[in-house]
């Protein structure tokens, strides 16, 4: 049978990036004990109160079809959340409720990209970005971020990559994998480029609530003047440790949502009512569990850095946000891939090679802060030990 080209465009885009993780997983499934730092899945349980709302609403019959961009209580909750976050009025008709940031990104690019349109991607980048851009026929154009500048953007380099075919810039701050939180000035400079060249800005803000230091989260969506060109994609997967709810959204202009609702309905025909109820509840309440989760990510990152401090071969910077730390292994002379593979085979620690996220992360490991402090400290000890053994 003949298949549509989309199946080839997205095939295997990510498969080889996960080789170390899959090898580790196979060994774990066979009963071996390994330290797993490869996946960005929150290990902490979500707030029980949110689960209770979901369960009660499901039992109360909130299991019917629900079309459109989302039901009124959820859209009100999103509106309040974004009005507070952005400091300007964001109306309930500025959202499309979708199954997670991933679907939001896919809908975003389906709605703005024609075949051969180019999308600027800041390298290193999250593993599925190439696929969401390529699905509608777009061409990812990567722009390097410098490890030695903490993976912050160089705006001149971004402008240099813009061509007449460029349609959008994809941002992700706080970043997976780098942990960088772009400053207001950086976002404003990139936004000015988008205005100058009439580009969309797709902003993946799934880690927006995980800011660790003195940095402040800033989004191009904060600026009313940019509203017509900004598509924010986010969810409660990381903020509330609920990735399995697949509860996410697009926040954009009302005009965008009105135009694109037909795309999301084509795919979904509405979202589960009880998950909308639970998401509305999550967005309008404070939870001790989410505050504790934020505290723990910082403590774990510090434990990792402390464990590496004695090494003269491996270093890491405190992440500004998110749930990952980049460990620089360039001084060992090994690539991130080679180091990560040896770390698995010789020290039973599973990490992601930086190369899995783009060329700029070569010679790095991405460490997920998804195990407790003691285990992170032990992983750091083994990373430093392996580095010392490499001559
Ligand atoms: C940068 C980034 N974007 C999107 C996602 C997917 O998030 P969601 O669970 O909301 O689809 C992830 C998950 O790891 C991520 O790291």
Image: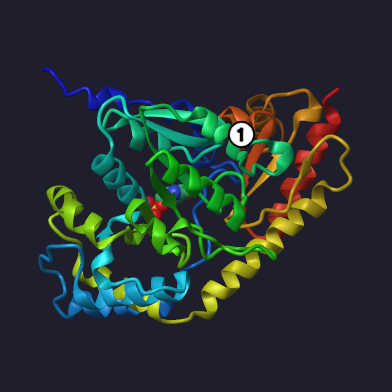
Q: Is residue 211 left or right of residue 317?
A: left
Identified at 53% across, 41% down, the residue is 28
Residue 386 placement: quadrant: top right
| SS type, badge 1 | helix
Residue 68 falls left or right of residue 56: left
Quadrant for residue 90, please give it. Answer: bottom left
Q: Is residue 180 left or right of residue 86?
A: right
Mark 1 neighbour class, 10 Å CA radius: few under 14, some 14 to 19, many 20 or more: many
- The residue under the point 69% across, 33% down is 343
Closest to the observer, 214 or 183: 183
- Residue 75 seen from this side: yes
- Asked if the beta carbon under badge 1 is closer than 8 A to the nearest atom of ligand 1, the reply is no
Is residue 358 found left or right of 381 in the rendered image? left
- The one nearer the camera, 250 or 67, is 250
In the rendered image of this protein, does residue 64 appear above or below residue 350?
A: below
Please state the horizontal and vertical placement of residue 219, each as a whole percent of the image.
49, 59
Relative to 287, residue 180 above or below = above
For the residue pair 74 and 324, the one nearer the viewer reads as 74
From the image, which quarter does the C terminus lie in? top right
Residue farthest to the front?
196
Q: Quadrant of the N terminus?
A: top left
Residue at which label 1 appears: 354
Viewer-proximal residue, 69 or 307? Answer: 69
Can you tell which quarter of the image residue 139 is in? top left
**Residue 248: x percent and y percent?**
33, 59
């Amino acid at each position: 049978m003949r298949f549509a080209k989309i199946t080839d465009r997205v095939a295997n885009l990510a498969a080889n990036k996960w080789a170390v993780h899959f090898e580790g997983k196979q060994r774990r499934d066979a009963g071996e004990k390994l330290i797993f730092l490869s996946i960005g899945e929150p290990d902490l349980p979500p707030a029980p109160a949110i689960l209770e709302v979901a369960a009660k609403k499901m039992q109360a019959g909130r299991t019917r079809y629900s079309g459109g961009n989302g039901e009124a209580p959820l859209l009100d909750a999103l509106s309040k959340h974004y009005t507070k976050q952005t400091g300007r009025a964001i109306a309930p008709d500025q959202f499309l409720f979708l199954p997670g940031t991933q679907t939001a990104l896919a809908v975003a690019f389906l709605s703005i990209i024609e075949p051969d349109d180019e999308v600027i991607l800041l390298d290193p980048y999250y593993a599925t970005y190439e696929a969401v851009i390529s699905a509608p026929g777009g061409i990812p154009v990567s722009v390097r971020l410098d490890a030695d500048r903490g993976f912050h953007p160089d705006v001149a380099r971004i402008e240099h990559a813009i061509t007449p075919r460029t349609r959008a810039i994809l941002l992700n701050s706080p970043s997976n994998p780098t942990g960088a939180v772009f400053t207001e000035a950086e976002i404003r400079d990139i936004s000015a480029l988008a205005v100058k060249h009439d580009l969309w800005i797709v902003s993946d803000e799934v880690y927006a609530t995980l800011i660790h230091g003195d940095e402040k989260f800033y989004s191009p969506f904060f600026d009313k003047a940019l509203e017509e060109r900004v598509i924010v994609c986010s969810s409660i997967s990381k903020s509330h440790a609920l990735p399995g709810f697949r509860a996410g959204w697009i926040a954009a202009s009302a005009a965008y949502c009105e135009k694109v609702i037909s795309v999301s309905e084509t795919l979904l025909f509405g979202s589960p009512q009880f998950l909308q109820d639970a998401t509305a509840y999550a967005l309008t309440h404070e939870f001790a569990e989410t505050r504790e989760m934020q505290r723990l990510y910082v403590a774990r990152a510090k434990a990792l850095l402390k464990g590496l401090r004695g090494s003269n071969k491996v270093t890491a910077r405190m992440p500004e946000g998110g749930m990952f730390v980049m460990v620089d292994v360039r001084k060992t002379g090994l690539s991130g891939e080679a180091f990560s593979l040896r770390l698995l085979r010789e020290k039973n620690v599973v990490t992601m090679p930086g190369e899995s996220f783009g060329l700029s992360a070569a010679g790095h490991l991405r460490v997920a802060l998804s195990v407790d402090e003691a285990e992170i400290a032990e992983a750091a000890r083994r990373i430093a030990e392996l580095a010392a053994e490499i001559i």
